[in-house]
Image: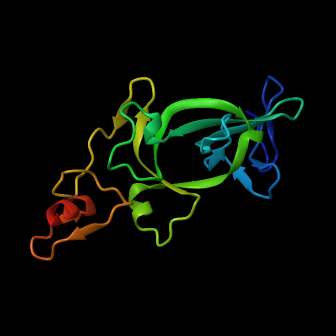
Amino acid sequence: MAKTRPGIPTKTKTGKRDLESYTIRGTNKIVRVGDCVLMRPSDTGKPPYVARIEKIESDARNNVKVRVRWYYRPEESLGGRRQFHGAKELFLSDHYDVQSAHTIEGKCIVHSFKNYTKLENVGAEDYYCRFEYKAASGGFTPDRVAVYCKCEMPYNPDDLMVQCEGCKDCWSSFVISMVLI
C-alpha cells in the first residue's frame, strides 16, 4: 500500500486526486473534510444550504468537487417546522451528494444542542443539531426528546424559559403568557 506525505494530494485510479483542503473562491477561508459549509442555492431568494464536507477531490482538469452530507432545515423535512424548532436548528440527514466546490459560500459551525445552549453570543454562522433525519422515510433519531415545560414541548433555545423557585418546574414564555391572560 502506498503512503502519502501530509499535504500531498493522493491520486485515484480515475485521474481524480483527493485534496486535504480547498480555499473558498473570492476569500482566504480554507475548508477541510469535516467542516460545515454554506452552499449557494440555485434560487437566490432562498437561504444557503448547510452541509458537512465528507471528501474533496479534483479531476484531471482541476475541477474541484466536494462530497457533502446535507443538513435539512425543519421546514424541508416531513412534518415541517414545529413550535419547538429554533430558528438555527438543523437536522443531519442521510442524504449525500457531490457538488462543485465553487458553490461554497462560506464556513459555518453546527454545534451540538447542548453546546449551542451554552454559547454566550450566537453568531450568524452558528447553527445547532439535535436530530438525525432519514430523508426517504422522514424518520428522526432520536425519535423522542426531553421536555422542559408544563406544555410538554421540547426546549426551544429561542424562547425564554423561567424556572419556578418553589417547585423548580420550567415554564416557556408561551405558557407564561397564557397564564397571565
| In the foreground, 79 or 33 | 79
- At a point 32% along the width and 48% down the height, the residue shown is 83
- At a point 24% along the width and 70% down the height, the residue shown is 162
Q: Is residue 67 above or below residue 88?
A: above
Q: Is residue 138 above or below residue 119?
A: above
Name the outermost residue toward the left. Answer: 167
Name the outermost residue toward the front. Answer: 181
Q: Is residue 162 left or right of residue 93?
A: left
Looking at the rendered image, the quarter that the C terminus falls into is bottom left
Q: Is residue 146 left or right of residue 18?
A: left
Write down the quadrant of residue 138 in the picture: top left
Q: Is residue 30 above or below residue 131?
A: below
Looking at the rendered image, the quarter that the N terminus falls into is top right
Q: Is residue 65 left or right of residue 169?
A: right
| In the foreground, 29 or 32 | 29
- At a point 37% along the width and 49% down the height, the residue shown is 85
Position of residue 101 measured from the top left corner of the image (x, y, whole percent): 75, 39
Name the outermost residue toward the bottom. Answer: 165
Position of residue 50 measured from the top left corner of the image (x, y, whole percent): 58, 44
Position of residue 135 measured from the top left corner of the image (x, y, whole percent): 45, 28
Write down the quadrant of residue 19 in the picture: top right
| Residue 3 visible in the shown view | no
Q: How many marks?
A: 0
Position of residue 176 measured from the top left corner of the image (x, y, whole percent): 20, 64
Name the outermost residue toward the right. Answer: 61
- At a point 90% along the width and 30% down the height, the residue shown is 61
| Residue 112 visible in the shown view | yes
